[in-house]
């Protein structure tokens, strides 16, 4: 259960010892240290390191931490006085957007010099200056190197590798209808390679994969346990598994996407000077370096930090500068739900049938391929359909609005019917060979 913590015991002992040693000669700030209250969902492995470093850099302040998961953070910050919180620091873009809309944040009182605010096609800072990215998580591939060696498979470097027939039966994909981070994974190739090419690529990838949904094991558990060789995931899940001893590596594809964590000062901050100090520290060179600790391994948002890291440490800014990271998160936000729903109708539900068709197609001659491949590779609908604001609203509001649910369901039925007709035609053509 989430709860407010009292001052950390380590901080109490440190302060008590320092005051006892210093006696009456202790500096004034040692007696009058002001609290900076930070609401976060970060684990202790992250928070404890930032706490210690911040209090060394700003000895006049003492960090107090309130732990809340993102779904609990918004109601906590809506209470009277915003619960006494000075800073909200977490990975929940929707929560920050809602807090901004409710005028619950103040404009950041710090300089953002040296922080680009975007990576490739993705904007990571609030354009109006109410919150800034403090780190980013990257989407990509969890791999089990020993499994790949055992099965004679290469480490995949990019999306097209996952479509190769050799990966059939060795790939795990999260169901985007059920797994919260997965809709972005689906949309990355659709944006990077184009609508038609992206769906064609996904069709071949899905033929090699099995799906994991809500209530199933984590992708990192499946891959780490040797039940599959490659799984699509987000880096912080895999980094946590690696820190706990899982035999995994993480591959960032050239065309990837990022999910930013942010930091913001509350409108009702009781200690705005302390809040400013903490935000400055998190975004500073020193604060950003903490993210690269082996037990944390997050991606800093200050490009200069990467200059001091090993060549193997992923640098999304460098990859974006070479044409990678084309994914536009602003565009993706509105269409995520209909894209995920379409994916579910044409790939997840008929996955076994699709895999069987692909297996037969891969064994067919070129003449058959030219007839059947377009039937398996076609997108479920025109791209304009998922970018229609009315369609996006239908999927966004379907849980609370019966009319929206009816519209969304009708679209799903139509997408599924079109896919079924194409698969039936492909089956007939393959049966005639």
Image (cartoon, helix red, strand yellow):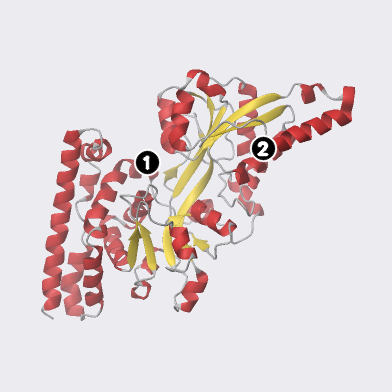
State the residue in front, 153 or 307.
153
In the image: residue 189, left or right of residue 387: right
In the image: residue 182, left or right of residue 65: left
Residue at image point 21% right, 71% down: 357
* Residue 433 in picture, x, y percent from top left: 13, 81
Could you say whether the residue bearing mark 2 is in a helix, strand or loop? helix
Among numbered discs 1 and 2, the one appearing first in the sequence: 2
Quadrant location of residue 11? top right
Task: Tell me the number on the disc at residue 172.
Answer: none
Quadrant location of residue 228? bottom left
Which residue is disc 1 drawn over? 330
Does residue 266 appear anywhere in the picture? yes
Residue at image point 16% right, 59% down: 419
| Crowd band around label 1 with a 10 angstrom C-alpha radius: few (<14), some (14–19), many (20+) | few
- Measure the alpha-carbon separation of dots 1 and 2: 33 Å
Quadrant location of residue 253? bottom left
Residue at image point 33% right, 74% down: 165
Could you say whether the residue bearing mark 1 is in a helix, strand or loop? helix
In the image: residue 92, left or right of residue 372: right
Which residue is disc 2 drawn over? 51
In the image, residue 19 sits, relative to residue 331, either above or below, namely above
In the image, residue 419 sits, relative to residue 27, either above or below, namely below
* Residue 6 in picture, x, y percent from top left: 64, 30
Does residue 119 appear anywhere in the picture? no
* Residue 375 in picture, x, y percent from top left: 17, 65
């Amino acid at each position: 259960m989430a709860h407010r913590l009292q001052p950390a015991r380590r901080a109490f002992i440190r302060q008590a010892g320092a005051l006892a040693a210093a006696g009456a000669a202790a500096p004034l700030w040692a007696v009058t240290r002001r609290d900076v209250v930070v609401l976060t969902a970060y684990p202790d492995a992250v928070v404890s390191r930032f706490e210690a470093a911040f209090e060394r850099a700003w000895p006049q302040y003492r960090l107090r931490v309130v732990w809340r998961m993102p779904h609990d953070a918004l109601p906590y910050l809506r209470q009277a006085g915003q619960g006494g919180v000075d800073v909200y620091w977490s990975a929940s873009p929707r929560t920050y957007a809602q807090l901004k809309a409710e005028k619950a944040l103040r404009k950041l009182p710090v300089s953002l010099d040296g922080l680009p605010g975007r990576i490739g096609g993705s904007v990571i800072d609030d354009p109006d200056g109410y919150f800034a990215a403090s780190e980013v998580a990257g989407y990509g591939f969890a791999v089990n190197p020993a499994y790949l060696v055992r099965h004679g498979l290469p480490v995949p470097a990019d999306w097209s590798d996952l479509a190769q027939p050799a990966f059939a039966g060795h790939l795990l994909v999260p169901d985007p209808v059920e797994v919260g981070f997965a809709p972005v994974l689906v949309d990355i190739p659709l944006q990077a390679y184009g609508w038609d090419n992206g769906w064609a690529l996904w069709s071949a990838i899905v033929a090699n994969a099995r799906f994991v949904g809500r209530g199933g094991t984590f992708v990192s558990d499946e891959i780490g346990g040797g039940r599959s060789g490659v799984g699509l995931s987000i880096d912080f899940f895999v980094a946590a598994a690696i820190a706990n001893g899982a035999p995994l590596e993480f591959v960032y594809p050239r065309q990837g996407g990022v999910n930013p964590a942010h930091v913001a000062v509350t409108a009702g901050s009781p200690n705005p000077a302390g809040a400013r100090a903490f935000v400055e520290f998190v975004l500073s060179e020193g604060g950003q370096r903490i993210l690269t600790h082996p037990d944390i391994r997050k991606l800093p948002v200050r490009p200069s930090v990467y200059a001091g890291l090993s060549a193997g440490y992923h640098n999304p800014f460098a990859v974006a500068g070479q044409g990678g990271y084309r994914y536009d998160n602003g565009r993706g936000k509105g269409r995520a739900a209909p894209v995920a729903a379409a994916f579910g109708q044409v790939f997840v539900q008929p996955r076994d049938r699709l895999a069987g068709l692909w297996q037969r197609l891969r064994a067919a001659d070129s003449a058959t391929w030219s007839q059947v491949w377009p039937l398996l590779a076609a997108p479920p609908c025109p791209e304009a359909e998922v970018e229609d604001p009315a369609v996006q609203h239908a999927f966004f509001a379907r849980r609370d609005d019966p009319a929206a649910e009816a519209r969304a369901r009708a679209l799903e039925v139509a997408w599924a019917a079109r896919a079924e007709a194409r698969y039936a035609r492909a089956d007939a053509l393959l049966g005639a060979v």
